[in-house]
Amino acid sequence: MNSDFGVPRELSELQKKRAEYHPDLPPCLQGTTVRVEFGDSTTCADPSSVHVISRAFPHTFGQPLAHFLRATAKVPDAQIITEHPPMRVGVVFCGRQSPGGHNVVWGLYSAIKIHNPESLLLGFVGGTEGLFAQRTLEITNEVLATYKNQGGYDLLGRTVDQIRTTEQVNAALTACRDLKLDGLVIVGGVTSNSDAAQLAETFAEAKCPTKVVGVPVTFYGDLKNQFVETDVGFDTVCRVNSQLISNVCIDALSAEKYYYFIRLMGRKASHVALECALQSHPNMLILGEEVALSKLTIFDITKQICDAVQARSEKEKYHGVVLIPEGLIESIPEMYALLQEIHGLHNQGILTENISSHLSPWASALFEFLPPFIRKQLLLHPESDDSAQLSQIETEKLFAQLVETEMNRRMKEGIYKGKKFNAICHFFGYQARGSLPSKFDCDYAYVLGHICYHILAAGLNGYMATITNLKHPVNKWRCGAAPLTAMMTVKRYSRGPGATPIGKPAIHPSIVDLKGKVYELLRQKASSFLMDDLYRNPGPLQFEGPGADVKTYTLSVEDQDYMGRIKKLQEYLDKVKSIVKPGCSQDVLKAALSSMASVTEVLSVMSTPSFGGHHQPL
């Protein structure tokens, strides 16, 4: 274990300037009084999952939403907390490092010290393994000094991204009891927050006083739902990648002889690739969600790219840039099935070198067709969540090779009459996730850290810190907390041929919405991107100047203020109650009954499990 965690960094002049920046707080978090309004009890988005989730989480399912209020808010039944006894809080980095993570710790530290200087914040050194082993570092202003507004997770480090097995959960429970923690803040993405929900339920069942709070920090951008508009780190990674892509685009335009195939991190969802495409305008983006929906084969995709290369050659263009999300390989039906078969053999204990001889005939034929380097990568042991090691599978090289082979065939047969096809491949992932965070991610993470304290002060367990209205300035942000169980669904799937479909409640990754405004924006521009070389460079990260406060297209285009709409609906319902009282006229009562009957009929239909919108592809 690295013994240098928490040691002051040596900062460049730019980093020192960054460290001096202090994020603002929204009005609802200012001062030392915590004001919280509780909404109605929550459910989950998929009605068919309610029964399963409520049985699995009897103590934490159905908890109400919480909204934190500014001092001037006039809400009669708001809970006002003015007494803040000393608090002991632990914080652990659970997911993969994401720009802005350090600011969650800073915001949490600032909040607990503002409300009571005697409170203590302990960071678990070495991620979840540090939690299980009770390795802690007391967070102080001196410790934080060179980590404020800085990238990475090296303040505390991270290891295994799970708290899932009985042994792990019991170790976490023991650690929290031994350290007498009032709260445990888990910083991570989809998997980490699913584990946080289970931990909160277990703690409640065991009558452990430690309250568990989750924070949405993952640069994949796939922890999105009705309560979470975006994740800490997504803004930074998309900006950094977009500049790199733009540099490659200009290089392609300058040399006019290479096609660049660029694979981007992002796991199964294509959020990062979609946002980068809108920021940098490459010629093509192969979206995994489109491929899955249309059930495109590896040969369909190859033909699609080859047809684009040929169409561009007719305009004397022999260069281009193609973006490929790393999750694409699992979106191709036959490749997904092959991976599932390989993973099933791994689970049976078959040695890696013997797996190819145990494949079914069709899988064996596909496996043998693939280039040797891809075969080797597909045989890698799956991740802890049973997904392929996507960062290690060079899908961009696979398609570059397949396209080159097909273009050579077309040239030989006289179908293609242009210049020889040349490809250069890149994988952009690790270059961006350790970046200095953007101003937005610095602000977002810092404010989320403050919200974590407010959640603990209100005595809430099994909640995620949330902010809505994020596309507006910080002083317009709405801060709250949503139960982790309200973000869950149950996806049933098979682990291999003939297996019984299984599923358990979890927060699942959100995929790109092919009916959403962001995707529609790409579709409107796709043909001009393909043929007209409208390359765009968003420039480097800025803390000051014209680009400092620019938000992602993903955040700006969609109208996501779910929490605001919930409050608006409550206002309408309260208004109806105030008008329709005993003694009101018959006409008013009839109009109310007629309207309510229509509304409830529509909502009942929309809430049935068979109503469109609840099915998620595997």
Image (cartoon, helix red, strand yellow):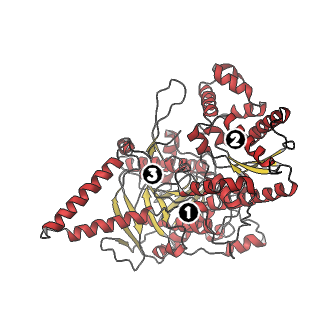
Residue under label 2, please give it.
304
Whether the residues at callouts 1 and 3 have beta carbons within 8 Å, the answer is no
Q: Position of residue 161 (x, y in %)?
A: 59, 47
Q: Percent from the top left, x then y, of residue 364?
A: 68, 22
Upstream in sequence: badge 1 or badge 3: 3
Q: Amino acid at mark 3?
A: Met
Q: Position of 427 compared to 447: left or right?
A: right
Mark 3 is surrounded, within 10 Å at the Cα level, by few (under 14), some (14 to 19) or many (20 or more) other residues, namely many
- The picture places residue 529, in percent across and down from the top left corner, at 70, 55
Residue 557: which numbered mark, if any?
1
Most distant residue in the bottom direction: 72
Mark before the other along the chain sequence, 1 or 2: 2
Disc 1 is placed on an element classified as helix
Identify the image quadrant of residue 142.
bottom right
Tell me what residue is drawn at x 64 percent, y 48 percent: 159
Q: Residues within 10 Å of mark 2 (few under 14, many from 20)?
A: few
Mark closer to the observer (1, 3) = 1
Q: Amino acid at mark 1?
A: Val
Q: CA distance from mark 1 to mark 3?
A: 23 Å
> Could you tell me which residue is drawn at 59 percent across and 36 percent down?
295
Residue beneath disc 3? 487
